Image (tube, rainbow, N blue to C red):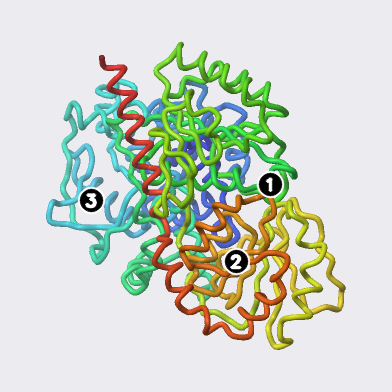
Amino acid sequence: MKSIAIIGARLNSSRLPKKHLLSLAGEPLIHRLISRLQRCQTLDGIVLATTADDFNLPLAESVASLVPVVRFNGDVNDLMGRIDRVIAEHNPDFITYICGDCPLVEPRFIDHALSLLAASPDSDSLIMKESVDTIHEGMGFYSRQGWQKLMAVSQCSMSREHVGYGDKINPVLQRLAIDDCDDFSSVKHRISVDTQADYEFMQQVYTAWYAENDQSSIVDLKWVQNQLLANPELSSINQHVVQKKPDITYKKVSIYTHLSAEIGIGHFKRCQSIAESLKENLGLGVELHIVGSPMPGFQINSNTSWYPDLNAMLKQMDCDDNPLWILDFHPGFININQLQLTLKARRQATDLRILAIDKLVDIIDDVDELFIPSFYCRSSHPKISFGWDHFLLSSPATVTPQNQLLVITGGSDALGYGEYLPALIESVVNTDTALHWVQGPLAPDPKIDRNSRWHIHKNPKNLPELIAQSKFIFSCYGLSLFESLCSGNSVLLLPVQHICSDEELAKLAEQHCCITTNFDNLEQQMAAVTQHPEQFDAMRKNAVQLLKPKVGLERLCQHVAHHLKLVNNSVSR
């Protein structure tokens, strides 16, 4: 009696591309999964089933020394066909299908399930008893005759793409109801990796396990349950993620933006945040289109295309059939007239909805909504949406503040703070306060002597932690300012020059949530906030009450869902 496990995996995930090669405690996710399967006593073999296209070649090469690989030449979405090709080549009596994004499958449960299936010759497959609650996911068990029955009823595209769905729409399998191999019912939580939030959760699990256990071990699933029960912050990382359903066709959204040293990275980072939120909260596929060039140190978790200039991007727009576009451009760095012509043409040709972000009021007549992630807007146009609940902020890190000052000058330090601030701050701030400077990925080196008190962080990945642990924060105007205000620490806004209008700055000052400055009082204000922070307690409390993390992203998701619903209604008519 021959049993094999078949791992179904491709790098083309719409929500988290190349997820199988992401690192978990120093090893690719797919390697961690294979290590778990290798612990099974009932398996005679493990095979990776992927597709034959070049995009998935790195996946095949990554595991070639560990397990056999079958590269399927048929339809890339035909998962049933892929698995059936493996079965035809290896001729097993029993098949365990393993979803390739589930690096916490339990070897003991696989042995338990296969043993019961082998002992029940009249059964085609397995199902958990109705009374059993379990954390297991990402597995399916079939006898050979059961698999043949399933293939026979898997004829539509959905049933070919999702293993087992054919039996749901046309039940033919005799399923044996079984108990669990142990008590895995204490908590219900996602243990598959479909989105960036899932990956962050899994990273924390694996990092914590191997900090205390040998590298030759595998993460214990009972231990994971206990960690989830004991640590609500761990469970909150990905508990909001929507699980895609096989009977629903999820829409795709196109996000268009740009990136350069002159523009900065704010638009790009915001679009990344929007993309992750849409994938996690709505289950949408996201295609990110960027005018600019890929740069070292940028982590991109969406399907992304890069364009050398606006004309190249506009050609892409001419053939983009996705039902919703999100546009996030700085109007000072784009040809508005060219963009408007393309938008008019596409809206006449298709049932397209367009949601613009932030400063694109010049194209208000050619979009369906302008979503401004700010408390302030001069216009009262009915298409414009803004407010304190529109800031696109993630949750702040939970770190105890230390006696340190953090300076954030933006991705490119467009206002040149690095030329004069370091020396000025050193002359004002007490020597017992640690000084930290965040240098954006496109910013020049600040003028700091080698032997000075400064710690420089170049494009730090742990910026949320740096913000949370800094008792004092000096920030330029932009997203980093409002992220800093969420921390509840003392925040000073650096002179804004042309970045922010006088009216907007006055409206911000009215809210009494941060210390505002100009060149005339900069030194005085820096001294006040660092030497007498208790004077600003009310200001810090106001900031925390005004700015609620994740609320803006949730609001944006609601607006996107509304626009997609309008597209569906238009198509149905």
Residue 218 visible somewhere in the drawing: no
Query: Is residue 82 positioned above or below 502 on the image?
Result: above
- Density class for disc 1 (Cα within 10 Å; few <14, some 14-19, many ≥20) is many
Tell how many labels.
Answer: 3
Query: Of the residues shown, which amino acid type is indicated by label 3?
Result: Leu
Image location (x, y in percent) of residue 435: 71, 76
Q: Which residue is mark 3?
A: 116
Quarter of image, res 516:
bottom right
Reading the chain from its start, which is encountered first: label 1 or label 2? 1
Measure the C-alpha gap from mark 1 to mark 3: 59 Å
Q: Residue at x 82, y 60 (%)?
A: 445
Toward the viewer: 227 or 461? 461
Left or right side of 130 for 353? right
Task: Find residue 264 and name its label.
Answer: 1
Left or right side of 108 for 472? right
Image location (x, y in percent) of residue 128: 19, 50
- Density class for disc 3 (Cα within 10 Å; few <14, some 14-19, many ≥20) is some
Query: Is residue 185 positioned above or below 369 on the image?
Result: below
Measure the C-alpha gap from mark 1 to mark 2: 23 Å
